[in-house]
């Protein structure tokens, strides 16, 4: 008869710790596998949407839309037209709030004839909404953190959550795509699309809406809303060749119809002027500038400010901001934009 060996308390404790470690490692592996699966699923959904929403792969089409900025009595109406004769030849026209612009693109060159030296906030915000490819684009620093299902506008949607972490930067956004058509329906809380319609084998929303901060010297928390209704989107086999004649006395720049827009990769904290603090001056400065091919702002100037003291500090601060440059087919290009610098005082 063999006597059973006694297992000491220390041995039992060691076995328990080992089993716990193995269990935790298995759980970590499973969680990691789930995250990789979600990231792969999110990337696949974004790629499907990019292909489905890419009307610019259609050889020839004409698009016309009505535009409304603001609400109620403060509405600023506008109009947009696009003659698309392929990636290498196009013409678009935009007007709103007294600003007019006509651009012609031939190859990698773009001619721009407009009513003011700088672009309009109206034109920039309109193109941001129109640039669906840019919204579906992922930067190298973007990371998919989840995929969820929800009902939007009565239809099932896949929502892909992404975040970006950089030098002083944290951004997160949720892109929602129609589950049956891959049409984009929402980008975060401020951009919405509806009424998607087919053109060829592509799909395109006929109603767009956005809301953004539009600070002025008197009201730096003011919001600007933009509503767009596509009136016409039809395939066309031919256009009058004179439509694409570059305007005389206008120099072309390297660009494209809708570049992938710049993203902030290094932010800057402006110096709050001591005199402004003493006078309890706060507010916002709205700065126009061009993000160049190196990701730096040039040709900057203040277009709206609550104080000259804050203007000086803001113009110094934007010099330290760094961007990933705008790109056309992977080539870095100049990009006009507006940057907001906010100054907020704490309690006395």
Image (spheres, grey):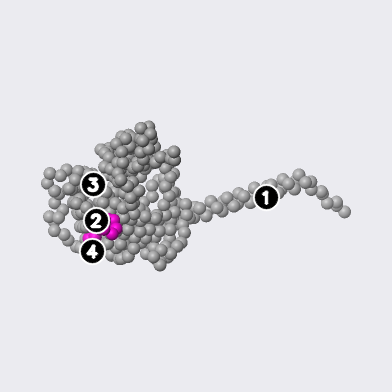
- Image quadrant holding the N terminus, namely bottom right
Describe the element under mark 1 as helix, strand or loop: helix
Q: Which residue is mark 3?
A: 119
Q: In this rendering, would 200 be left or right of 48?
A: left
Q: In this rendering, would 149 be left or right of 304?
A: right
Residue interval drawn in magenta: 63-77
> In 3D space, how far apart are the residues under numbered discs 1 and 3 (Cα atoms)?
65 Å
Look at the numbered discs 1 and 3 and tell me whether their residues touch, using CB distance below 8 Å.
no
- On whether residue 66 falls in the magenta region, the answer is yes
Q: Residue at x 41, y 40 (%)?
A: 345
* Front: mark 2 or 3: 2
* Front: mark 2 or 1: 2
> In 3D space, how far apart are the residues under numbered discs 2 and 3 (Cα atoms)?
17 Å
Describe the element under mark 4 as helix, strand or loop: strand
Q: Residue at x 83, y 51 (%)?
A: 4
**How would you rate the neighbour count of disc 4 (Cα within 10 Å): few for under 14, some for 14-19, many for 20 or more?**
some
> x%, y% of residue 231?
24, 64
- On whether residue 165 falls in the magenta region, the answer is no
Q: Which residue is mark 2?
A: 76
Q: Which residue is mark 4?
A: 232
> In 3D space, how far apart are the residues under numbered discs 3 and 4 (Cα atoms)?
25 Å
Q: Nearer the viewer, residue 96 or 110?
A: 96
Describe the element under mark 2 as helix, strand or loop: strand
> In 3D space, how far apart are the residues under numbered discs 2 and 1 (Cα atoms)?
68 Å
Evaluate whether residue 201 shows in this view.
no
* Front: mark 2 or 4: 2
View extreme (top): residue? 274
Q: Which residue is mark 1?
A: 19
**How would you rate the neighbour count of disc 1 (Cα within 10 Å): few for under 14, some for 14-19, many for 20 or more?**
few
View extreme (bottom): residue? 154
> In 3D space, how far apart are the residues under numbered discs 1 and 4 (Cα atoms)?
66 Å
Q: Residue at x 32, y 47 (%)?
A: 219
């Amino acid at each position: 008869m063999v006597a059973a060996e006694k297992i000491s308390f220390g041995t039992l404790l060691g076995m328990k710790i080992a089993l716990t470690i193995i269990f935790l490692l298995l759980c970590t592996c499973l969680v990691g596998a789930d995250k990789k699966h979600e990231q792969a699923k999110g990337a696949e959904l974004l790629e499907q949407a990019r292909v489905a929403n890419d009307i610019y792969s259609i050889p020839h089409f004409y698009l016309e839309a009505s535009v409304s900025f603001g609400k109620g009595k403060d509405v600023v109406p506008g109009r947009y037209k696009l003659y698309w004769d392929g990636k290498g030849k196009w013409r678009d026209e935009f007007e709103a709030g007294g600003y007019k612009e006509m651009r012609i693109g031939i190859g990698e060159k773009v001619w721009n004839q407009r009513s003011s030296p700088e672009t309009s906030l109206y034109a920039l915000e309109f193109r941001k909404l129109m640039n669906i490819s840019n919204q579906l684009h992922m930067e190298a620093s973007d990371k998919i953190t989840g995929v969820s299902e929800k009902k939007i506008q009565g239809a099932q949607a896949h929502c892909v959550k992404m975040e970006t972490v950089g030098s002083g930067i944290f951004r997160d956004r949720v892109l929602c795509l129609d589950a049956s058509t891959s049409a984009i329906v929402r980008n975060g809380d401020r951009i919405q699309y509806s009424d998607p319609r087919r053109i060829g084998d592509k799909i395109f929303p006929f109603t767009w809406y956005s809301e953004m901060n539009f600070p002025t010297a008197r009201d730096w928390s003011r919001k600007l809303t933009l509503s767009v209704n596509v009136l016409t989107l039809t395939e066309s086999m031919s256009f009058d060749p004179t439509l694409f004649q570059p305007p005389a006395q206008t120099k072309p720049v390297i660009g494209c119809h809708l570049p992938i827009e710049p993203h902030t990769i290094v932010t800057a904290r402006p110096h709050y002027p001591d005199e402004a603090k003493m006078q309890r001056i706060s507010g916002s400065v709205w700065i126009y500038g061009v993000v160049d091919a190196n990701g730096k702002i040039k040709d900057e100037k203040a277009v709206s400010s609550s104080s000259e003291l804050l203007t000086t500090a803001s113009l110094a601060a934007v010099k330290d901001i760094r961007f990933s440059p705008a790109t056309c087919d992977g080539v870095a290009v100049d990009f006009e934009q507006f940057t907001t610098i906010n100054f907020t005082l704490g309690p006395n």
